[in-house]
Image (cartoon, rainbow, N blue to C red):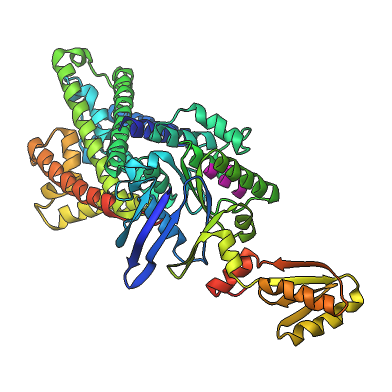
Amino acid sequence: MINVVIAELRKLRRPTLLLSTLLTVTLLSGLFTSIVFLRVGSKGGNGRRGETITAAELSHATGFLYGFKLVGTLLGLVALCVFASQTAQEYTYGTLRNLLVRQPSRMKILAGKFISMKLFAILMVLLAGVVTISLSYALAGHAKVNTSAWSSGTAMHLLAQSSLNIFLQTLSYGLFGMILGILFRSPISAIATGVIWSLILETILGAVLSGTAKWLPAANFSNIGEGGTLDVSYKHSLLISVIYLTVGSALVSFLFKRRDVAN
Amino acid sequence: MAIEVSGLTKIYGDRAALSNATFTVPAGTICGFVGPNGSGKTTTIRMLLGLITPTSGSAKVLGESISEPEKYLPRVGAMIEGPAFYPALSGAENLKVLANLGGFPQSRVAELLAKVGLGDRGNSKFKTYSLGMKQRLGIAAALLPNPELLILDEPTNGLDPSGIHEVRELIRDLARSGTTVFVSSHLLSELEMICESLVMLREGKVIFSGLTQDLLTAQRPLILAKPEYEIDLIKLKALVEGAGYKVKVSGNQLEIDAPIDWAPNLNRLAFESGITLSSISPLLPSLEETFFEMTGDDK
């Protein structure tokens, strides 16, 4: 198993993938944190869905986590793209046959891929955390935000909790991408389906059929990152996500194990 | 035996890609695997490597059943249907991925790149490689485990004549060191030069399995007869036709469509007619001619 993880990490660390992903995460983290602090108190909104966050709110123990939480869903979508392409490319390049000749256990291949991409997701979340929190401190003075509560014990506890939640959110989206990658066996189809479903179809379904949003996968993945909301609890989202991902993983594991490798 | 195949069948829908195939590949030999496109060669190779599940039948590779590929694949090297690698990784990185995966030492990578003539291009991205270089990298990947059995599907595709020569010599070297090589190719003249045995497929069925020499001699050879004096050609031709055999003048000799064991009679007939033969020899058909005759393919 460790051999598979090392081999997969070798592929993930190629500069075109690693640097471009980390650059994207850095830019998105910087952009969202800047919006929160540079447009503080703006009537046009500086938070999720046009919500206005004031300097007073940013001075609370959670103030330095707004940017981190805002970028969470996009980290998930980046993970969806990376996990989907890393899985589906084995079919399009025809490299799956090489992998299976060198490691005949298909389940080990799948598990090794997932573990290595999990490590990649941890790196993305860590980077986003470092960038958003550093920038929050850097911009706090400009936004007239008092940062004394940010280093309290409560703030540290919230940081650990948010980091875990954003990691789980990123991982959920990533696993969703991996499932799509194995189902479609084409990076473009898998990514397009995943992104369109998460960003467009779920929004339309949620708007047209009231009450459906709390049962849809991507909405629940994102809700985990937010730590739950008044409408949908954290536990509910965790449970629904686990059900979706377990069923999806079982299905694609079965397919991956049984399907002939004929390309 | 390195490979033992018994009644192996693969059916897709209502089409049999391979039908009841039975053959063996002796250990330590070079065995050619030939057949027209779509005859089931790649399907067979994929089943031997555990990539495709047979519909029925069985096979053993290095003494282990193909239902348990993990027991023999660490001792097998393979290149199937051309080289497939990650375009954004260098040749060396691609090999390191496979070395990691199989648990082989990383030091093998530089060694193998040098062996296939890619020593100076190992750090270039795979997508910048020519077809011949990609093919060489595929062969290097197949050699990673220092295999007991090497399965190569069209290894000389895209190689120039010197590259083809190098691959031929590499295969011979490997066979000399005890590696069994199972190689498919469309270059039948190449296979004829290096393969002791052959497996021939047509429309998913094995139509020959055995020694290359046996296959060639089983085809009706010609007798080549050359008289000492060219002036005797017509007289000799008339003698052969009189004996009831077809004959054709080819340059300064005759090509006689007769069994080899008629050669002493020919010699006697010529002597009795005052013709001295400067040479008399059998002409075996080439593998290519045999292939076309057996598979029914048009040239």
Q: Is A74 located above or below residue B38 in the figure?
A: above
State which quadrant residue B293 falls in: bottom right
Q: Is residue B209 shown in magenta?
A: no
Residue A49, image x, y percentages: 22, 41
Q: Is residue B247 left or right of residue A260?
A: right
The total number of labels drawn is: 0
State which quadrant residue A45 falls in: top left
Report if residue A182 is visible in the image: yes
Magenta-drawn segment: B128-139
Q: Is B119 located above or below residue A61 in the figure?
A: below
- Nearest the viewer among A76 and B28 is B28
Q: Is B105 located above or below residue B157 in the figure?
A: above
Q: Quadrant of the C terminus of chain B?
A: bottom right
Report if residue A28 is visible in the image: no
- The residue positioned 22% from the left and 15% from the top of the image is A146
Residue A239, image x, y percentages: 10, 41
Q: Is residue B129 shown in magenta?
A: yes
Q: Is B114 located above or below residue A203 in the figure?
A: above
Q: Is residue B130 left or right of residue A222?
A: right
Residue A168, image x, y percentages: 20, 34
- Nearest the viewer among B128 and A238 is B128
- Nearest the viewer among A245 and A161 is A245
Residue A135, image x, y percentages: 33, 22
- Nearest the viewer among B205 and A93 is B205
